[in-house]
Image (spheres, grey):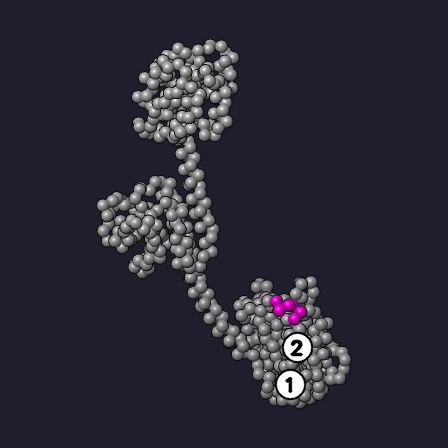
């Protein structure tokens, strides 16, 4: 069945008549041929040779034929998909109700009684034409919506595929197949950088047609107002033909930052303009995001530079133990992030006594580092030869508990005063993991447990001292909780103090540097070389 354009006055129905009465055929021809494309046949055999090629819209079918049955013809036509929309009007002289019902059951749409009234025939044919036109209109609308949905789907795919794109040039290349989203013959994407246009993509989908560049359009038409963010459509005479241009601004921070210029030979309808607007909205969002990312990247580089300086300062504060005669001392300082809350310090209180300070501030990062620096300064302030380690820790704790209690920061600390001539050690610990002390030649170690509470947590804390003497070959290990609290690769087990003591004992006969390296290697193997979760700091002291 042919499709009739309801808006066209030239739309003509194809009307086929199958009736063995020559007079009936002639009368119907006189009535209908002027307005419609008309054919008439008088037998089933003739009908079969005509019907497929003519492909009628309306069939006037006589129910009684010399070589066929109208009812059966009707059924056969309905079984053929080519004629599923064919309008079949029965021609019958019968007024019996059952004949009419049988005709409808066979697939007829309506009937005309013989002898017929010309007005009735014309009216029913006109009704058929209106119904066919309406069906065609619905069909066209459905196809349009289907095509629109496909294009919208392609646009959605383009957006999803590029939502994480990191470069505007890379995004522009995705518009290389933009004609699959909107039917265009050419596309040009231009960004304004410091007021100057930079073309990101320029492509013609019709090589036989000439199109105007953005620069040429801009030079000839005053439409590119950087304050106007609305889509503009214009018609330009080019090459003797009309060229339709759709100019869609690309904005950033409410200002025009570029244009999407689309061209073809037919005007752009509102649905297409809406689709183009969706594209430019996506571009707007992406450009703003990429600009924000660029600025964040710049700020991050500044931050990294500053952090690197802080780390360099933090490392510069670390003491040099090489000046301590008669002892082999090494240290490890491995922050979990760029800067650490852990710190250790060391300095002579007089010619014979050297003081070690090892501290672990809660958390890690910038804030912990700042608190750590304050604690370092306080220990240096109170570290005088006449003060014992427990007194020094108590004095620092009194100040910290007042200064940082509202910040919910605290620390653990070991202060160890070593007489480098006699080997005498005065040791005090504020809530810190136990130090490990190993006598030369012995197969076990002593754990030097905490002698007081956390630092900065309680204003009044009781701290005490432990005394012992280091002899030749003895070794003392001070460390922060980043070592025993390292998780195994499966996350089910901690490294723990027992495993740490074991590694220390296995390597106690070698140099202090080899001991600390062995411990770090064991921790890394235990964790499966996972990302370090906490700061790791150690001091290993061996008497020669």
Q: Quadrant of the C terminus?
A: bottom right
User: N-terminal of the two: label 1 or label 2?
Assistant: 1
Assign a secondary structure to mark 2: helix
Queried whether the magenta region covers residue 318, the answer comes back as no
Query: Would you place residue 301 above or below residue 14 in this image?
Result: below
In the image, is 491 to the left or to the right of 217? right
Q: Residue at x 64, y 71 (%)?
A: 524
Q: Residue at x 38, y 45 (%)?
A: 182
Answer whether residue 388 is visible to the viewer in this image: no
Query: Would you place residue 129 above or below residue 400 in this image?
Result: above
Answer whether residue 44 is visible to the viewer in this image: yes
Queried whether the magenta region covers residue 528, the answer comes back as yes
Nearer to the camera, 232 or 295: 232
Q: Which residues are magenta?
A: 525-530
Q: Residue at x 73, y 72 (%)?
A: 498
Q: Residues within 10 Å of mark 2 (few under 14, many from 20)?
A: some
Quarter of the image holding residue 50? top left
Quarter of the image holding residue 465? bottom right
**Alpha carbon distance from label 1 to label 2:** 16 Å
- Name the residue that disc number 2 marks: 518
């Amino acid at each position: 069945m042919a499709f009739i354009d309801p808006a066209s006055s030239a739309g003509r129905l194809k009307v086929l008549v199958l009736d063995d009465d020559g007079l009936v055929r002639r009368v119907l021809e006189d009535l209908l041929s002027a307005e419609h494309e008309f054919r008439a046949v008088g037998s089933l055999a003739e009908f079969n040779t005509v019907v497929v090629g003519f492909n009628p819209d309306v069939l006037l079918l006589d129910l009684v034929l010399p070589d066929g049955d109208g009812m059966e013809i009707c059924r056969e036509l309905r079984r053929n998909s080519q004629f599923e929309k064919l309008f079949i009007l029965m021609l019958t002289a019968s007024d019996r109700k059952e004949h009419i019902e049988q005709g409808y059951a066979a697939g007829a749409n309506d009937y005309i009684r013989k002898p017929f009234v010309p007005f009735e025939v014309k009216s029913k044919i006109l009704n058929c034409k209106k119904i066919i036109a309406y069906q065609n209109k619905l069909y066209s609308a459905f196809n349009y919506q289907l095509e629109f949905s496909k294009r919208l789907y392609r646009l959605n795919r383009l957006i999803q595929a590029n939502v994480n794109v990191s470069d505007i040039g890379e995004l522009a290349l995705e518009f290389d197949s933009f004609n699959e989203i909107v039917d265009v013959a050419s596309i040009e994407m231009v960004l304004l950088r410091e007021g100057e246009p930079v073309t990101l993509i320029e492509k013609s989908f019709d090589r036989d047609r000439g199109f105007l560049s953005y620069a040429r359009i801009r030079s000839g038409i005053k439409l590119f107002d950087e304050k106007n963010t609305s889509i503009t459509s214009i018609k330009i005479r080019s090459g003797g033909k009309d060229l339709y241009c759709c100019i869609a601004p690309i904005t950033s921070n409410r200002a025009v930052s570029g244009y999407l210029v689309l061209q073809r030979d037919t005007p752009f309808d509102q649905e297409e303009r809406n689709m183009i607007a969706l594209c430019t909205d996506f571009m707007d969002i992406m450009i703003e995001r990429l600009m924000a990312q660029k600025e964040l990247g710049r700020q991050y580089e500044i931050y990294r530079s500053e952090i690197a300086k802080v780390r360099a300062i933090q490392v510069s504060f670390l003491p040099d133990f090489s000046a301590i005669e008669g002892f082999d001392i090494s240290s490890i300082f491995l922050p979990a992030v760029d800067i650490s809350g852990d710190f250790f310090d060391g300095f002579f209180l007089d010619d014979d006594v050297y003081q070690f300070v090892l501290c672990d501030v809660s958390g890690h990062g910038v804030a912990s580092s700042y608190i750590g620096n304050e604690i370092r300064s306080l220990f240096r302030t109170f570290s005088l030869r006449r003060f014992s380690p427990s007194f020094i820790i108590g004095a620092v704790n009194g100040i910290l508990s007042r200064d940082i209690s509202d910040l919910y920061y605290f620390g653990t600390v070991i202060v160890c005063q070593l007489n480098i001539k006699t080997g005498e050690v005065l040791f005090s610990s504020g809530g810190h993991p136990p130090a490990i002390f190993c006598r030369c030649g012995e197969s076990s170690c002593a754990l030097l447990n905490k002698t007081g509470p956390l630092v900065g947590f309680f204003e009044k804390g009781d701290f005490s001292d432990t005394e012992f003497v280091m002899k030749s070959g003895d070794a003392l290990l001070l460390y922060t909780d980043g070592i025993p609290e390292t998780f195994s690769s499966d996350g089910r087990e901690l490294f723990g103090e027992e495993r740490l003591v074991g590694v220390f004992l296995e390597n106690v006969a070698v140099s202090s540097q080899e001991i600390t390296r062995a411990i770090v290697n064991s921790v890394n193997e235990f964790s499966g070389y996972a990302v370090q979760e906490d700061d790791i700091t150690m001091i290993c002291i061996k008497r020669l």
